[in-house]
Amino acid sequence: MQAAVIVFPGSNCDRDVAVALEKASGRPPIMVWHQETELPPTDLIVLPGGFSYGDYLRAGAMAAHSPVLREIRAKANGGMPVLGICNGFQILTECGLLPGALLRNSCISFVCRDVWLRVDTTNSVFTCGYAQGEVIRIPIAHHDGNYRAGSDSLEELEAEERIAFRYCDTKGETSDAKNPNGSAHHIAGILNSSRNVLGMMPHPERLADARLGGTDGKPVFSSLVEALA
């Protein structure tokens, strides 16, 4: 599997996700600057976390208009897997590849800590390495992670089982108390209708190696390697 990691001014997790991808696949990803208009031959596109353009105007809003996004949209619409983590999730909603928007956290502050997630679908190349309903621990670090969408979009996400991860407690139960940002339906990650685009606020690359304190994020990358082999 050959991955490409898109680098924006303000990206700060591009190297972290590159390490996780290389460890999972055995091949270093290609780092692609956001001003490129073409992508090299690749099997997977990753939009990493960070603060593209310093979150100026709105998180992900300016990055969504970077030249490389036209090619990313075309590849995604053609079926190529695209993974957006944290700021990458924000960019995917801003450019229209995923529905909804990521708003300011309900607590009106930056949140940086480990949270518990429930895997709500294994029907994707990103989550097939988990068990249905599995509870995992993954770090978050964001100021604008409050997922919001219209009622029709939320109903569609539920009906089509496109909510990949939800915030929960250690037993997999959801509640406002365990929702770190106020996201609707306790959403931590969603899929597009074709299930080849995943946006998630938590950072699986930060817990993809035992030396980092855990491996709960590793299946996101190993699932992709196995599915795209």
Image (cartoon, rainbow, N blue to C red):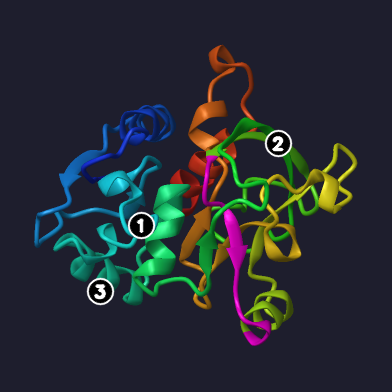
Q: Which residue is mark 2?
A: 115
CB contact under 8 Å: marks 3 and 2: no
Residue range highlighted in magenta: 142-152
Specify the farthest residue to the bottom.
Answer: 152
Q: Secondary structure at mark 3?
A: helix
Q: Secondary structure at mark 2?
A: strand
Gap in angstroms between the C-alphas marked 3 and 1: 19 Å
Q: Nearer the viewer, mark 1 or mark 2?
A: 1
Q: Residue 37: x and y, percent?
A: 9, 62
Q: Residue 90: x and y, percent?
A: 44, 58
Q: Residue 112: x and y, percent?
A: 59, 31
Q: Residue 65: x and y, percent?
A: 22, 66
| Residue in the foreground of this view, choosing between 41 and 103 | 103
Q: Amino acid at mark 2?
A: Val
Q: Is residue 113 visible?
A: yes
Q: How many marks?
A: 3
Q: Earlier in the sequence, mark 3 or mark 2?
A: 3
Question: Which numbered marker is on residue 74?
Answer: 3
